Image (cartoon, rainbow, N blue to C red):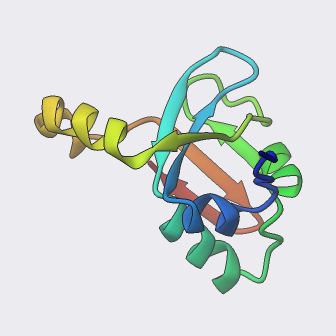
Amino acid sequence: MGRIKLETITDLARRGYNAKIPCLGCGHASHWNTVELAMELQRRRKSLKIDAVEPHMRCRACGKRGAMIQPVEMFSQMRRNARNLSSQSADRGFAANIGNFERVC
């Protein structure tokens, strides 16, 4: 049995993963819907390769650029969301600054 290569945001979306994005500076993490992230990157004509996106991510907590994109199963995230429904509507504190693109997640 071989390994699955997840090299792009669309690879994550196709396999049914969302993205957990921890900051390399302070460790603050947020969760993203990979389908929405891929659509926004395509709209901005930016690369969908994970290695190209990671350096442009900016943490809302500390302001440092650079993050690591990790796959997270959607089921476990839905369970987490069900517990935190009221806090989900608030600012989750992580942004991506890719060109003029800035999105709070």
Residue extending farthest to the front is 1
Counting from the top left corner in percent of width and height, residue 17 is at 52, 52
- Residue at image position (76%, 51%) is 4
Nearer to me, 100 or 71:
71
Counting from the top left corner in percent of width and height, residue 27 is at 63, 16
The total number of labels drawn is: 0
Counting from the top left corner in percent of width and height, residue 57 is at 72, 45
- Left or right: 87 with respect to 61? left
- Left or right: 1 with respect to 105? right
- Left or right: 95 with respect to 32? right
Task: Work out whether 6 lies above or below 81.
Answer: below
Nearer to me, 50 or 56:
50
Residue extending farthest to the top is 26
Counting from the top left corner in percent of width and height, residue 67 is at 74, 34
Query: The N terminus is located in which quarter?
Result: top right
- Residue at image position (23%, 35%) is 79
- Residue at image position (49%, 69%) is 36
- Residue at image position (26%, 32%) is 80
